[in-house]
Amino acid sequence: MFHYQAVFRNTQEDPPAGLIVVERSTGPLRAVIWSHRSKTWAFNPKAAAPFLYDDQNFDRWTEVDRTRAEEIARSNLETELPSEEELHRICEEGVAAEPHPAYHGWTMRRPEGTWSYYRTVTSISTELPGPTLIVVEGTRIGTQALIWDWANAIWQYDPAKATLHLHETDSWTELDRAMAEEFSRTSLGTELPSEETLHRMCGEGEAARFRPQP
């Protein structure tokens, strides 16, 4: 199943300037984008994820159907949108070409139905000063993650930011549930939600990623 996102330079009042095609999968994000530089469709989830998951870009993309995506490709990008069979092939080749080691002892895909808790010792971003807590749910459709947002005192759904931090740094420690509850209470000043509530929050966050912008 594919989702098509029209990308705008500034706001949705502008003409579409790009397309991001996301293939739903049981693993990490699969995304194909139109590269203006090379004039090709390229597998590039590392570029797509930060753009789609950044709240500051909420007015710079919107989901469209396949027919509209084909029109944008033809009229605005001066190219043809590949068939879904071709898009799947691009994704498969892109995934195969990427290394999949366990970075710093952590792998992106977690076993379905499991929960993992990670205490960070440095900040994840300027919006989320550390230390904080990352909660990862392993599901059939891939990794889902919540981060305690100090600035707004809420659990923020942000699998891209969590994945990047866990992959690219070693400034975290895995905790069991009891330790995570204690850390949440004493260091974050909040109660760690039940796994049932965390699961609901992840589901709502994942659904919101693909909800068309009003």
Image (cartoon, rainbow, N blue to C red):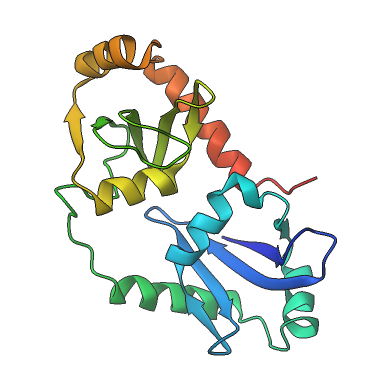
Residue 183 drawn at (x, y percent):
26, 16
> Residue at point 68% right, 45% down?
211
Nearer-the-camera pick, 196 or 212: 212
Task: Answer above or below: position of 152 versus 83.
Answer: above
Nearer-the-camera pick, 38 or 114: 38
Query: As drawn, is 98 to the left or to the right of 1?
Result: left
> Residue at point 52% right, 63% down?
48
Residue farthest left in this picture? 105
Task: Answer above or below: position of 195 versus 162.
Answer: above
Query: As drawn, is 188 to the left or to the right of 211?
Result: left
Quadrant of the image containing the C terminus: top right
Q: Residue 120 sits in which quadrant?
A: top left
Nearer-the-camera pick, 83 or 42: 42
> Residue at point 53% right, 89% down?
38
Q: Residue 16 sits in which quadrant?
A: bottom right
Quadrant of the image containing the N terminus: bottom right
